[in-house]
Amino acid sequence: MMNLDSSWDLIVIGGGISGAGIFREAVRMGLKSLLLEQQDFAWGTSSRSSKLVHGGLRYLKEGRFFLTRDAVRERERLLVEARGLVTPIGFLVPVYKDRGPGRWTLEAGLSIYDLIAKRRQHDYLDAETFVNQAPNIDRKGLVGGFQFFDAQVDDARLVLRLIFEGMANGGTALNYVRVAAVGRNKDGRVNGVTVEEVHAHQTLSLKTKAVINATGCWAERLHPSPQKNRHLRPLRGSHLIFPAPVLPVDQAISTIHPADGRAFFVAPWEGAVIAGTTDLDHQNSLSAEPRITEDEVAYLLDGLHAMFPALDVSARDCIATIAGVRPVLSEGKCEPSEESREHVVWVDNGLVTVTGGKLTTFRKLAFDALKAAKPFLPTDTTTDEGSPVFQPFKSQPVSPSPLADSHWERLNGRYGDSAETIVTGTSPSDFAIIPGTQTMWAEILHAAAHEKIHHLSDLLLRRVRVGLLTAEGGREHLSRIRHLCEPVLGWNSNRWKKEIRDYQEIWRFAHGMPGHFARSRGRLKSFFFNVGKRLRKHFA
Ligand SMILES: Cc1cc2nc3c(=O)[nH]c(=O)nc-3n(C[C@H](O)[C@H](O)[C@H](O)COP(=O)(O)OP(=O)(O)OC[C@H]3O[C@@H](n4cnc5c(N)ncnc54)[C@H](O)[C@@H]3O)c2cc1C
């Protein structure tokens, strides 16, 4: 970091989707741009979402038409411009005689969705056809249901692709560098920041023409809300992840949770199935990894039992949990799920703060922030809202290709131009898919070599999601991962031991089962271990 230039046009604080989107567009505008993230890129909320790029049907119900309109339009653009990363997903919504939204309410919402997208993509199915699509669904009182299309994404990879393409086009982005303070001249105009390199404990002062504070839930630490009665209200949402055979669904299903009438969903994701979500005030420190509570696990399991009464899914089947904290602006007057998900922009003499919002609408947020920063930036720069967000999709670089078209599309979506390097520089055995995921071993090697890894957790929780998709954080794969990455990471044996220990601790804390659910899993494991030991002794 000591070699870092000391003077910038724009410094973006926060390496989540908001900061990454702003950084990508700022670089395209020709600004000398620096992005700083206090932890790893996407460490915050942006790797812990429900992974949907969606219009949000429920926002229509709440009368937030413009939010849905913007989100549906962005979804349509991203499906084209982020092909292979933002992918279509079918959604099923059952209609019951005596509960949940009725047929005509849903028909109205989905018709508006289609009008915005300018194509019809929903159908009403009778009960029998619906059950064929969702075989394990609760049939009591089922009268039929809808099928429509939305999109989903690997949220962390969306952030990373924006950041790495911004860097490839001349921007600079650093993880594990915290902004401690924003500096101003004697007239109060922003002129720099003080930064702290987290691992080296070094501090440095940098000059800049403007700063964009895109720190999500942390935003008020750098700039308090200018609205006296409206502040950030961190709201936690948690998910459970199951192996696909436990929850066999090949499209997403959304119902109403019986406890509180909130939307509850399951969706296939990356070879596993994700179920969520909760919506509660997050009382814990924002410095700690957010984690699911026992009550949230029980609530999500109740949702699953109501959706699929015959499946008998239990906490023991769950491979990982994810909890994230929504940055929501609130006047503190309503229930968490009634709070607006729209973003806000505050401008203060060279410091633009942008927070709230959704993953889906990151580009709109980026342009709103950059337009607000314009008076402080070099005069000859303008935003370019028409350009595709990413480099165009490429066809396979080698022929005959070692990859099926669908695998290439996925690789290109996640890594952009670097997908070519992965394909041409990989030994055939590393094209194999890690069981239970859609990730190739080659991706792990590429990320370790080229994607700013500081810790094993960066690699397994965000560059690839093996830590969330395989049992116990991918424990059985750790020795192969070490063998593969040792030559490029350059960690000695002690460092590997420490990284593995730290990673497993983070995993248990933030992605394992909490409290008594974890203890009962432990008891069950030791029961089988002891039975195994006795049997071995008996037959020895
Ligand atoms: C449970 C849940 C489900 C969701 N599902 C969806 C969904 O399906 N679709 C959708 O569109 N949206 C969804 N969202 C909303 C979406 O995830 C968030 O709005 C979005 O990720 C917020 O991004 P952000 O960049 O503003 O914040 P973050 O991702 O939190 O990024 C802020 C970053 O700033 C960094 N930072 C803080 N202070 C400093 C500092 N001083 N110096 C340097 N760095 C700093 C933090 O470490 C953090 O990484 C969901 C949110 C939650 C919680």
Image (cartoon, rainbow, N blue to C red):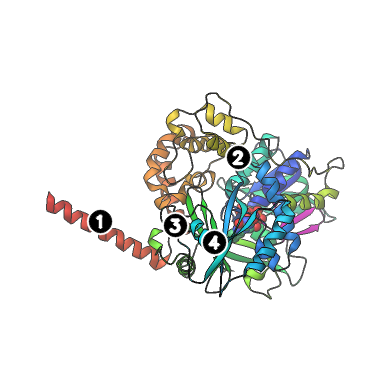
Give the CA separation, mark 4 to mark 1: 35 Å
The answer to whether marks 4 and 1 mark residues whose Cβ atoms lie closer than 8 Å is no
Q: Residue at x 76, y 71 (%)?
A: 228
Q: Amino acid at mark 4?
A: Phe
> Which range of residues does the magenta coloring cover?
340-362
**For the residues bearing labels 1 and 2, Cβ distance under 8 angstroms:** no
Label placed on residue 356: none
Percent across and percent down for residue 231 are 70, 68
Q: Is mark 4 within 8 Å of ligand 1?
A: no
Nearer-the-camera pick, 126 or 204:
126
Per the image, the residue denoted by label 1 is 529
Location of the N terminus (image quadrant): top right
Front in this rendered view, residue 216 or 94: 94
Residue 91, quarter of the rendered image: bottom right
Residue at 70% of width from left, 54% of height from top?
72
Which residue corresponds to mark 2? 413
Q: Is residue 357 magenta?
A: yes
- What secondary structure is found at the residue carrying circle 4? strand
Name the side, left or right, on which 261 lies relative to 18.
left
Q: Residue flagged by tag 1: what amino acid is it?
A: Phe
**Gap in Å between the C-alphas at discs 2 and 3?**
27 Å
Which sits earlier in the primary sequence, circle 4 or circle 3? 3
Q: Which residue is mark 3?
A: 247
Q: Earlier in the sequence, mark 2 or mark 3?
A: 3
Q: Is residue 511 a member of the stretch shown in magenta?
A: no
**Measured Cα–Cα span from mark 4 to mark 3:** 12 Å
* Sequence-first tag of 4 and 1: 4
Mark 2 is on which residue type?
Answer: Gly
**Number of residues whose C-alpha sits closer than 10 Å to that of mark 4, classed few (under 14), some (14–19) or many (20 or more):** many
Q: Mark 1: which secondary structure?
A: helix
Q: Earlier in the sequence, mark 4 or mark 2?
A: 4
Q: Looking at the rendered structure, which numbered label has been put on residue 265?
A: 4
